[in-house]
Image (cartoon, grey):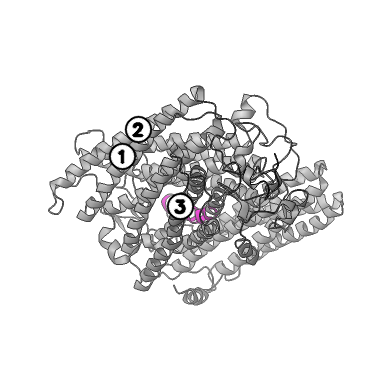
Amino acid sequence: MMKFLQILTIKPWLAPSVEMSPPNISAIVIDETADNSGPGKTALKFFLAIVTLLFFLITITFLSRSQYPDFHALAGEPWLPFTKPIQLWINSSCLLLASISLQIAVSLAKQNKTKSTEALVLLASLCSIFFVLGQIIVWQQLSQAGFYVYSDPANSYFYLYTGLHGLHLLGGLVALFLVSYQFFQQKKPLNVSKNLSLCALYWHYLLLIWLFLFALLTATPDTYKTIALICGF
Amino acid sequence: MYIAIADQVDDSAHPKGFLYKYIWSQDHKVIAIQYSITAILVGLVALVLSGLMRLQLGFPDSFSFIDPSSYLQFVTMHGMIMVIYLLTALLLGGFGNYLIPLMIGARDMVFPFLNMLSFWTYLLSVVVLMASFFVIGGPTGAGWTLYPPASILEGSPGANNGIVLMLISLAIFIVAFTMGGLNYVTTVLQARTKGMTLMHMPLTIWGIFVATILGLLAFPALLVSAIMMLFDKLIGTSFFMPAILSLGDTVNYSGGSPILFQHLFWFFGHPEVYIVALPAFGMVSDVIATHARKNIFGYRMMVWAIVAIGGLSFVVWAHHMYVSGMNPYFGFFFATTTLIIAVPTAIKVYNWILTLWRGNIHLTIPMLFAIGFIFTFTHGGLTGLFLGNVVVDLPLSDTYFVVAHFHMVMGVSPIMVLFAALYHWYPKITGKMLNTSLGKVHFWGTFLGTYAIYLPMHYLGFLGVPRRYFAMGDTDFIPQSAQNLNAGITIAAIIVGLFQLIFIFNAIWSLFKGKPAGDNPWQATTLEWQTSKTPPGHGNWGEELPTVYRWAYDYSVPGVKDDFIPQNIPQDKVIMLESNTSMGKENV
């Protein structure tokens, strides 16, 4: 940020001196994009900002809606489904495992260890698919217990949050599939490890979001009340 | 190390065959033209819709095919198409795509495939939107703000299929915009050529860059509200829907908050104003500097203003909701931020005028439209100061004063810039000049015509004439003269609409019969005018990328022979005047 503000103070109209022609051109330009991250990482950073905002905005509406009298939290009493959310813990472990596998796969890909990388990417993909299937199982359990998507705003938010999060993960799986395909073709191993590291970053981020959602959606009414109070709702 | 793409040699395979060159093209210029043509066509539909609305308002009960429902549908579709599917798409998808790589010295966008995908997804969103005209019940008539509960309850036109298609179309559009937007920001940050520092970028790119960031951060709010409203409509959740009677019957909703939707909508809706305005600000700055042969006044301040407006645009949204009711302290806060945002905006207006001051003004068609913009934007901006204040807004809200205000500031003004930009860059896009005489007729008809439409609307607003009404009926406070004014506005609107045909004719005629433009007909400094071919070929720059040695506004530099120095000319290649050769190095 400071760097950006510094850039904004430059006076570009000041005429460059004669000596500043090539090959000394580097003398007059300022290295503003010095993180060497490449377009993929820049785009991913912006995309993660968008994803954050998406979930942030839903959370704002969630906290506001949680203070209405018809909102009944899904945890806090023994008969409520998320007082002991065993299936959610299993799902979370799957996503955590996927995230860890991808991180290890990235370091192995950098060392050009193809076989182990392949295995770990496969493991990560399977764990992610298990996570999504696990979430669908939770949906089924909820609806079998009478917690339909429309019957309470707390239920609606659970389905909405998990649905959107699942869609983001499925989108990530498509990207991971494309990267893996490149990797198996062994066309540009260096680029592939870079792209794989972007996938890993995305997975870590989705894991982070899921952990936040997990905590939020299994909280008790008192917790909502406290958060809403702090936020001024 | 600058840049990933800029340092690369042109290893892109040139597409062959009509299909890959013009349909499934990944070339940013072709995608820009695809975006622009789609946006203009859908914009023409919206123009016709506004004509139909005006016929009803100007001559009530004269047209049997316009009933109250269809009138509301025309209003809704006109608004949504113009704001999202025309202005956003044309300014960012069209001009953003065309100008970013050319102005920063890149060969293409950094993700060309994603860019192509962005256009086809945008087209899909337009097709879904247009499909709503043909479904049972027709398109939604909920007003472009789509406020629940009315928008999804029986009684509103298009409350079933229409609103669902609208929400789906918006969601698809947002996906398309996100793909395009990620491309634009990444290209600006990562693919600038050597020497093209951020502060060497033309203001057009600054405007597009910041507007894209606004779009990326604002559209999620619309996406969230669209998804949640779809849940309410299709699954029966109660995110936004309160317990309510619909046509005398209870419906299965309870406890939801319509105000929540308004907050989400306007958290997107207000930055949207600047998503449209900032690219326009940037482009008009470049047009004015080029055609006044003078460096832009206060370049740094212009950049700061763009960034400041971008930041502030996220903290003013609730000024659209004064009549919805809010804590008085919030009203005070949002009124204050609204007035604060007028400061950087006013700085920009002053700087445009000071750029013109003692400039060598060439009254070309782009310049006429640019000067026209300064008038209409100042006008629309000043009425914004009225509406930004809570106590003044309350009586004026939902009247024609608001219609006049936002059409001046975000309808006419961006359109003036769009025309300035089209006349300015058409020679680069096609290699042909547009006809000047037709252009002048088009400008004066449009400029004076839009004033004839919107100036009287302010008076209608002061009288209390409400917006969105199909017919006024008999009221005590609206005199007959208001109806006469309405009829006059309608005639002016139809004439202005017809004047646009002149432009379309000019654009098509000039494509075949226009005067050849050459590479740099306006003698401009920015990089897009320095390509070796016009229109630029695939890859833009031939073998070698340009190197930038100066900012974008070296016009009329004292002691230099020509009145402009292109950005890619090094200091030792600048031709000095004879009398100055002793002071500097003379070179060819």
Q: Nearer the viewer, residue A178 or B365?
A: B365
Task: Say the numbered circle drawn on residue B352.
Answer: 3
Q: Chain of mark 3?
A: B
Tell me the CA gap for discs 2 and 3.
27 Å
Is label 3 or label 1 in front?
A: 3
Indicate the quadrant where residue A87 lies: bottom right
- Give, as a three-letter code, the residue at label 2: Phe
Residue type highlighted by circle 3: Trp
- Which secondary structure class fits the magenta region best? helix
Residue A184 visible in rendering: yes
Residue B449's disc is 1
Q: Residues within 10 Å of mark 3 (few under 14, many from 20)?
A: many
Q: Earlier in the sequence, mark 2 or mark 3?
A: 3
Residue B330 position, x and y percent, is: 38, 70
Labels 2 and 3 touching (C-beta < 8 A): no
Q: Label 3: state its secondary structure.
A: helix
Task: Identify the mark nearer the N-term, 3 or 1.
Answer: 3
